[in-house]
Amino acid sequence: MPKTGAQILLECLVREGVDALFGYPGGAIIDIYDQLPNYPLKHILVRHEQGAVHMADGYARASGKVGCALVTSGPGATNAVTGIANAYLDSIPLVVITGQVPTPLIGNDAFQEVDIVGITRPCTKHNFLVKDLESLPLIIRRAFHLARTGRPGPVLVDVPKDIQQKKMAFKFPSDKAVAMRSYNPTVQPNKQQLKKAVELLLGAKRPIIYAGGGIISSNAADPLAWLARTLQIPVTATLMGLGCFPGEDPLFLGMLGMHGTYAANMAITHSDVMLAVGARFDDRVTGKLATFAPHAKIVHVDIDPTSIRKNVRVDVPVVADCRLALEGLKEIVEARLTEKDWAGAHSPWLGQCKEWATLHPLTWKENGGIKPQYVVDAIYRLSKGQAIIATEVGQNQMWAAQFYKYNTPRTLLTSGGLGTMGFGLPAAIGAQIAFPDRLVVDVAGDGSIQMNIQELITAVCNKLPVKVVILNNGYLGMVRQWQELFYAKNYCGTCMDAQPDFVALARAYGAVGLRATTKDEVEPVLEEAFRTPNTVIVDVRVEREENVYPMIPAGASLTEMLLV
Amino acid sequence: MRHVLSVLVENEPGVLSRISGLFSGRGFNIETLNVGPTLEEGVSVMTITTTGDDQIIEQIIKQLRKLVTVIKVVDLTELTSVELEMMLLKVHAEDSKKAEIFRLLDVFRCKIVDVGQDDIIVETTGDHDKLRALVTLLQRYGIKEMARTGAVALKRSLQLD
């Protein structure tokens, strides 16, 4: 029996393992919506397309599956662009389906027409315009294949309305048909390079592992932990890498970079061998490149060859899937374990790292008001480290990175590369869809939360018990911090003391609104929030001018830390 | 340093903008870019000349390889190859100078493809240096217009050191 393009598309999504679709209807996508109830796909109606893509993104980050969003043409598609760019910079697998005006109208400035394939070319891993119905099934299969393999990323498929309506006999393309001669990511590591890497690691006096988000996306946490523990190598992680190594492990030095720990940044600077895995030497991590890890031989493992030698010199490049590379390293190391006490060789270095950690630990000074760090710490204690934490962007994000200890992968969902304000709430909703029974908390700022606050109703009407904890300081706090430190306290455009009543606003949306204005109220209010089976906003009035420390000024060296 | 890259691509709509967008978006420089069909249907070859230090050229090549529509990238600079470009020049040529210009064009093995009242159109093919020399020499008579194809290049079968 012939099927319409809309039916074929939805059937392909089901066969690719999609179970939830985040979307918003419109004229150019209505045919797919018309068929949607006939397929086993949970549809989450969002309130803004940016929210849809961030939800698909949060779903993907938390579950490890490909997230899927469905939006209409024109403004629906352009609203999705920020979400797509966000996923692109953090290498999150997404397939975004956009409706398009009928093929005879393309290029005619038709109603709600935009060249979304052109617009998203620089911020997708790849994108497709479906020009005939015959190619639709293969394009959908290739979209998922591209999104989830190699360096993961978002793929956009633009489907004109007439193609959704046309009919043909449907056959699901074979795996063989999906293969593309121009796309063959290298996943197997080169054995020689691995041997060289092991030589360096075993010969090191002051080794360090610099772990990034690639460990999480390739499910490489286990071989990483084995390697670090067997050879007693301290581990530091990027923002995207948090959770890839247990935050409570004594070998863990915390995050590195601009708001990283003193111990991590000093250890990087003094290391003699660095094993960088699934990380890309972002400028927020390296600071001034000329003084980054000046004494270290660098082994860089990444599935994306462009990441290697993009920013720093590399002594041993390993282009491979991080898990396969770490398992390969493990195999070589295992064969040599009896030769000598490799782990013992690093005890003076570990002692030094511990000294740094004791000298300047992550901490905060108590005074009368509520310290935002205390709130994050309380969330950590009360959730017993078992929550999935989403964050907005800014000071709230950095405190959430510093003061919550992530022990397992996929427990921190944060916009690392693009720094998208408004990411946290929709990402938390996406994660809660993937894990209905887990505690999902969005650590928010009063500025960021207002960028996608309309998604509160999406949480409420889907009965999602997401908790939003607003570290409310009445400022765009991170920019205010920069203004304080580097712009002579010219607080231009950052004061946000004209605010909605977040508690009343939560109630208006049908959520629960709670507030803490003194330190004593924080824990009881959080406990109540975590107990409540509804969507909750907790408005915590924190110290207004608290700063995130340590901080390395942009472009300075890792050793030039401003401490508490 | 100047590099000549031969880039084999799937010939589908938008492929040129993927390549040029990669260069513009990442701040790389394109000196010339030529696209044409290959023997294989559906596959085109782009010859791109660009400049940059080793690290930049390495990034350009890796980033090109990363594009899903790119089949193969070869840096011909590292190989012995044939590199040619075609150029059309409209040269100011008064009657009194014509004989002189024709002699010069003869030396460069150029072809005159059009003669006007006081100008001529010259067709020539050659490598980067030859074309540059010709342009320099003809500038004294006055070049009114110029159109160039950008380089096309092929690796030589015999790779002699």
Image (cartoon, helix red, strand yellow):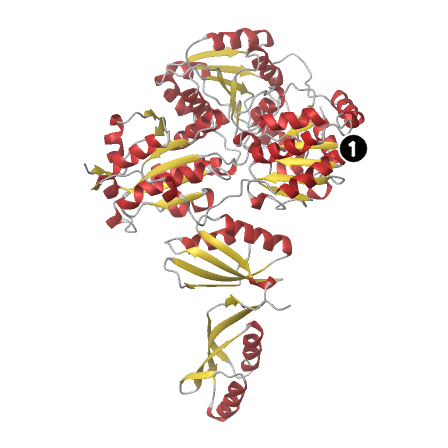
Furthest residue to the right? Answer: A348
Furthest residue to the left? Answer: A1
When the figure is inspected, residue A434 is found, relative to residue A23, above or below; the finding is: above
Measured as percent of width and height from the top left, residue B149 is found at: 46, 69
Query: Can the viewer see residue B27?
Result: no
Asked where in the image residue A214 lies, by quadrant, the reply is: top right
Instruction: Tell which of A474 and B143 is nearer to you.
Output: B143
When the figure is inspected, residue A206 is found, relative to residue A456, above or below; the finding is: below
Measured as percent of width and height from the top left, residue B156 is found at: 54, 68
Q: Which residue does the image show at 27% across and 45% down from the upper left?
A: A134
Q: Is residue A333 left or right of residue A279?
A: right
Instruction: Tell which of A402 and A143 is nearer to you.
Output: A143
Q: Which residue does the image show at 61% across and 39% down from the upper left?
A: A301
Q: Is residue A389 left or right of residue A44?
A: right
Measured as percent of width and height from the top left, residue B100 is found at: 53, 91
Mark 1 Cα shell of 10 Å, populated few (<14), some (14-19), many (≥20): some
Asked where in the image residue A545 lies, by quadrant, the reply is: top right
Q: Which residue is mark 1?
A: A205
Measured as percent of width and height from the top left, residue A40 is found at: 30, 25
When the figure is inspected, residue B35 is found, relative to residue B21, above or below; the finding is: below
Query: Can the viewer see residue A296?
Result: yes
What quarter of the picture does the C terminus of chain A occupy? top right
Q: Chain of mark 1?
A: A
* Circle 1 SS class: loop
Q: Which residue does the image show at 76% across and 40% down from the upper left?
A: A295
What quarter of the picture does the N terminus of chain A occupy? top left
Instruction: Tell which of A420 and A545 is nearer to you.
Output: A420
Type of the residue with mark 1: Lys
Asked where in the image residue A318 lies, by quadrant, the reply is: top right
